[in-house]
Amino acid sequence: MSEKILVFAGTTEGRLLAEYLGSHGISAHICVATEYGEQLVKKSDSITVSAGRLDCEGMQNLIREGFSLVIDATHPYAVIVSSNIKDACTKTGVEYMRLLRQEGSRQGDVVEVSSVEEAVKYLRGTEGNILVATGSKEIAKFTELDNYKERVFARVLSTASVAKACSDLGFEGKNLICMQGPFCEELNYGMLKQISAKYMVTKDSGKVGGFEDKIRAAKRAGVQVVLVGRPQGDKGRSYDEVISELNLRFGINTSSNESYKPKRKVTLVGIGMGNSDQLTLEAVNACENADIIIGAERMLSSVKTYCSNTFNAYISDEIIDFIKSHEEYSNIVVALSGDVGFYSAAKKLIEAVKKEGYELKLVCGISSVVYLCSRLNTSWEDVNLLSVHGRDANIIASVKSHKKTFTLLSGSDSVRRICASLIEAGLESVMLYVGENLSYDNEKITSGCAADLNDRDFGKLCVVLIVNDQADSTNPLGIPDDDFIRGTAPMTKSEVRTLSVTKLKLKPDSVVYDIGAGTGSVSVEMALVSHDGTVYAIEKEEEAADLIRHNKAKFGTPNLEIIHGTAPEAIKDLPAPTHAFIGGSSGNLSEIVQTLLSKNKDVKIVITAVTLETVSEALSCMTNFDFKCREVIQLSVSKSREIGNYNLMTAQNPVYIFTLSGASRCSF
């Protein structure tokens, strides 16, 4: 590396650049204006430093000492210095590169002026104390204000020469604050409150220079910001872009040499409901230190005051593609609604980020269920959590079995649809607490029973807490036969139904076929057990199918789908089953079993048979198909009946129950 670089460093980025060059053994000379600035630059074997202000001729003489590249990392407002550096490079024929920090976010009430002179002009005729944070070079211009010695508070560097110069101008005692920045939001806020400031004059020193912290502090303190805008026409590269250029220039292979590879970090931040006041301090800190924040438009509007560099995206693949194609960003924040662990896009992003090998961090946010319950003065530890935001959920099953059910919603008609379902299931009296635009200025919480809210209009950004004081979490198996609407269709008796469903060993999300469903008694019980799954009731008789519809409504099982037709034709286009109950096959048992196995070789099947002919068919299926697990039981049930003063047992027809499974693990 025979090349030698000259860096004019007047900013934090300039000092960071010096450290970067030194860490990679790149020969460089760092030129700063003051001895104080010299103390801040870390020297090394390859890094030399000099202090002193140079004119254009002095810069030319320095450049001619053998430098092949000049990097101008002076302050954005150092217009004359930057112009001299550029002219010196042109006259000496040496390459010039401008490192220019990004502008800060200007959220809030800001009065922008073109110069310090204009700021002074604006402040004439106003009243109240002023914090001036534009630097010591132009502090003399504020002496033109009436009563400036009492009204103006100068915040400048803590060097003896600067302090003396300000003192000579009349800035003394409590009106002279000598400190090295940049300053955090809290320190800025404390100073503004301490001096009872009404105005703050500042320059756009960018995020690195603490500009955004000043803006937020002023907003909190109710202080008017007077911003001296940046000079027009100054173009340059960001710090990351300069580093990328140096990597190419000096052959630093960041992909193959881990010691030179910048560690990329992706932080998934839960921002809460949306109001920036709900952000945790950890979330604020992550956003303040981010190179870029990625998120949907609503999320970005909550955090862009902490980082002006944003990218609008909410689809996981799009976010990952953007990160991969923008290597200049090392510290990336993805802003997500609510909390990162509650029905969040974070779930998919976590896997994608890990796959790319980036460092991953999750920052919790305040979830809407936590916020809504706090506004209702109730706990959320006993709430069953659901979401119908872009997904399906069996809200009826949850409301019937849980005192409290919370769900995220999707679309402005979500509340109306939920109320209609509750009314259909006989739950019209349960209470709903609908939260709209939670945490925002137009937040609204509406309460009422399902019957009252059925025709109400609500916004798109809604959640709801449903309270059912009559909730019953009793095991749903063993519903009495007389509770079903029966008609003339055949019905599997309660004891057989209970044992058959037990033998299936259903899961909450199972996909089940009930073939030959009759009145739907087995379908209903299976739907109550697999409340997060789907039960398909296949029935060829129209009268029986109509009975199933009535029983579906009576028992509140929206996850029960009725298929009018004869198996196996009626099941060919259905989703693959995890389980199947066959109570009636119309002579097609072998074909039905073959179709079930073709859809899922591990399907678990329970067949009930009363006639010897059906028993024979079931035995043939058990032998002819490749079932890993087989079981046959005969169930004989007798029930008591009163005759006078006596109870006599009356026997029912014996029932054969075949349990078959293609899975290698038997569990029945």
Image (cartoon, rainbow, N blue to C red):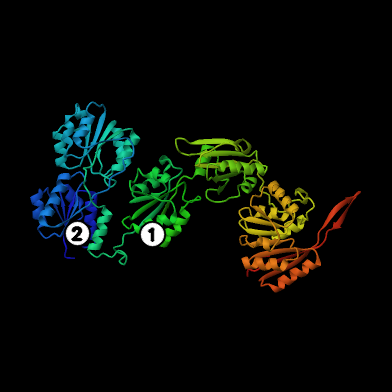
Location of residue 16 in the rendering, given as x and y in whole percent from the top left corner: 24, 53
| Residue 195 visible from this viewpoint | no
The residue lying toward the viewer, choosing from 71 and 367, is 71
> How many numbered markers are drawn?
2
Checking the image for residue 17, the label placed there is none
The residue lying toward the viewer, choosing from 145 and 619, is 619
Location of residue 315 in the rendering, given as x and y in whole percent from the top left corner: 44, 53
Relative to residue 393, is residue 120 depicted above or below? above
Three-letter code for the amino acid on which mark 2 is drawn: Ser
Disc 2 + disc 1, Cβ < 8 Å: no
Q: Which residue is mark 1?
A: 358
| Residue 490 visible from this viewpoint | yes
Q: How many other residues sit within 10 Å of disc 2, few (<14), some (14-19) or many (≥20)?
A: some
**Image quadrant assignment for residue 250:** bottom left
Checking the image for residue 44, the label placed there is 2
Location of residue 349 in the rendering, given as x and y in whole percent from the top left corner: 44, 56
Say what secondary structure mark 1 lies in: loop
Say what secondary structure mark 2 lies in: loop
Quadrant where the C terminus is found in the figure: bottom right
Mark 2 or mark 1, whichever is nearer to me:
1
**Image quadrant assignment for residue 131:** top left
**Image quadrant assignment for residue 126:** top left
The residue lying toward the viewer, choosing from 434 and 640, is 434
Q: CA distance from mark 2 to mark 1?
A: 31 Å
Location of residue 441 in the rendering, given as x and y in whole percent from the top left corner: 44, 35
The disc, 2 or 1, on the residue closer to the chain's N-terminal end is 2
Left or right, residue 97 beside residue 624: left
Three-letter code for the amino acid on which mark 1 is drawn: Tyr
